[in-house]
Amino acid sequence: MTEKKDIRILAYESSCDETSTSVIKNGCEIESLIVATQIKSHQRFGGVVPEVASRHHIEVISQITKEALSEAKVTWNDIDAIAVTYGPGLVGALLIGVSAAKAASMATGIPLIGVDHIMGHIMAAQLEDKIEYPALALQVSGGHTELVLMHDPIHFEIIGDTRDDAAGEAYDKIGRVLGVNYPAGKTIDNWAHQGKDTFNFPRAMLEDDDYDFSFSGLKSAFINTCHHADQIGEKLDKYDLAASFQAAVVDVLSHKTIRAIKEFKPKTFVLGGGVAANKGLRERLEMEIAKLKDKPKVIIPPMKLCGDNAAMIGAAAYNLYQAGKFSSLDLNADPSLELPYADSVLN
Ligand code: KG4
Ligand code: ZN
């Protein structure tokens, strides 16, 4: 009997402020992962400056391609596919990764696979444990807050979405009011653990019977509370503010997730995206799911795979490889890409 050949994918991620390359074996084993972060360059502007992001991506992408191969102890000859995030994200930033991946594919003849960034975040879980389908994902990042029903490894259906701000975006915006550097999520999370939920901020759409979210009302309530205190010269406790904000976010996210688990009965629940690093959210979801009678298996990726990275793109690309979903060399960046292959589920 011939031994099954290992499939190795070299993946690129450059959709926002991280340039990353990775070699992934068989969709689940990280042979190398390089992440070049630019956060320091953007901090003084209070958010990501698209032009600055693109320039940093260009500066490092060739070097970290070599590093990913050498750290994995492989050459181009060992690579079966080249994967790249082609959306959603900042168009200029995406284009650097897409151009690098296309150039490598053209020069080597290795097939190209375009990957949706959100599909990537969700598939970080596959690097941790085997996902059994149907599965449900709560995908929470700086740009997205979605509940995603996963019918199989590539056919996903969004069952709930944010109507306004994403959860991470709300963290970053209220962080600015508290004088916390961008991205603020981690610091607010740490502060929240040192305070109490004393402000009773609104929990929007909690009782609605859909799976959508809204965080802009919470953000405004938070900012108004701070401004009002400023005007009357009152000093508010930053730890209690953080704890109250986080309690409102976590309440809504966990309430809707548990309801979706009860309705759709997934075999696996997956948490993904930058906000998946939130300790409060991780603890609460684990606790609520443990109380259920029909518990799905829970996969929460390690912290280093919650933020943007190319390993998750390589994991998602493996599933597309298995399904024969390759891209042509005219692949373009799509800043507002919606999950591909979703239609075939909905129709
Ligand atoms: O997924 P990601 O790295 O980039 C996007 O695709 O958006 O997510 C970044 C977001 C930022 O808004 C950041 O503040 C948030 O994730 N974040 C957190 C935590 N760590 C990062 N939010 C809450 N708690 C955290 N511990
Ligand atoms: Zn992301």
Image: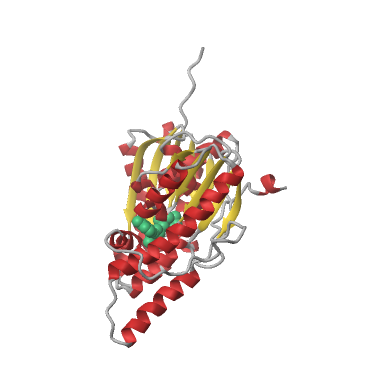
Which quadrant of the structure image shows residue 197? bottom left
Q: In the visual, does 327 lie left or right of 55? A: right
Farthest residue, direction bottom: 232
Which is more toward the observer, 179 or 56? 179
Q: What percent of the width, then of the height, locates residue 309?
A: 40, 49
Q: In the visual, does 269 lie left or right of 195? A: right
Which is more toward the observer, 333 or 208? 208
Farthest residue, direction right: 347
Please tell me whether residue 147 is drawn above or below residue 243 in the rendered image.
above
Residue displayed at 39% across by 42% down = 22
Q: How many marks?
A: 0
Q: What percent of the width, then of the height, locates residue 10?
A: 43, 40
Residue displayed at 49% across by 65% down = 203
Farthest residue, direction top: 1
Please tell me whether residue 125 is drawn above or below residue 1 in the rendered image.
below
Please tell me whether residue 329 is drawn above or below residue 215 in the rendered image.
above
Which is more toward the observer, 88 or 287? 287
Residue 58 appears in the rendering = no
Which quadrant of the structure image shows residue 124? top left
Residue displayed at 33% across by 46% down = 34
Q: What percent of the width, then of the height, locates residue 49?
A: 39, 69
Displayed-image quarter of ligand 2: bottom left
Residue 171 appears in the rendering = yes
Q: What percent of the width, then of the height, locates residue 240?
A: 31, 67
